[in-house]
Image (cartoon, rainbow, N blue to C red):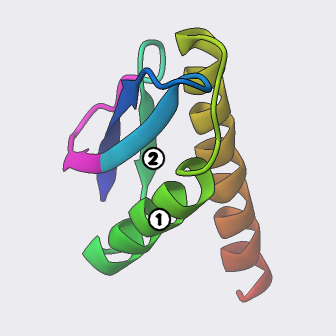
Amino acid sequence: MKYQLNWKTLPGLKGLSCSSFTAAPTNAPNMEQGVGFECTDEGECADLLLRLEAHFGPQRFSNNASAFESVKAYVTDWSARRNSEANESK
């Protein structure tokens, strides 16, 4: 299943925070202006959302661009590791 990732970037005293990660099923993820990814099922997607909340909850960013690129890099790395593990198990 393909998903489009969404989240809130909110200002705080120590910088911007990312939270409230959600994923919407889609046929064509927008990788130019958003973050798209694939999961085998809803459980894997829910697990990724929990990981994102745990990883980015304590982090603070100086601007929206760095927050967006950090989330995008995390999901891209997660996806690459997931695909690599799937290929190794074949």
Q: Which region of the structure is painted magenta?
A: 22-30
Q: Position of residue 29 (x, y in %)?
A: 34, 32
Which circle, 2 or 1, is nearer the viewer? 1
Neighbor class of circle 1 (other Cα within 10 Å; few <14, some 14-19, many 20+) is: some
Q: Which picture quadrant has residue 55?
A: bottom right
Query: What residue is at 22 percent from the left and 39 percent from the top?
Result: 27
Q: Position of residue 15 (x, y in %)?
A: 59, 22
Q: Residue furthest bottom?
A: 89
Asked whether the beta carbons under mark 2 and mark 1 sit within 8 Å of each other, the answer is yes
Which part of the image, by quadrant, shows the N terminus? bottom left
- The alpha-carbon separation of the residues under discs 2 and 1 comes to 10 Å
Left or right placement of residue 74 versus residue 40 in this view: right
Does 83 sit above or below residue 47?
above
Left or right placement of residue 45 versus residue 51 in this view: left
Which part of the image, by quadrant, shows the C terminus? bottom right
Query: What residue is at 59 percent from the left and 24 percent from the top?
Result: 67
Q: Which residue is mark 2?
A: 37
Q: Amino acid at mark 1?
A: Leu
Whether residue 85 is visible = yes
Whether residue 40 is visible = no
Query: What residue is at 21 percent from the left and 41 percent from the top?
Result: 26
Question: Does label 2 or label 1 sit earlier along the sequence?
Answer: 2
| Label of residue 48 in the image | 1
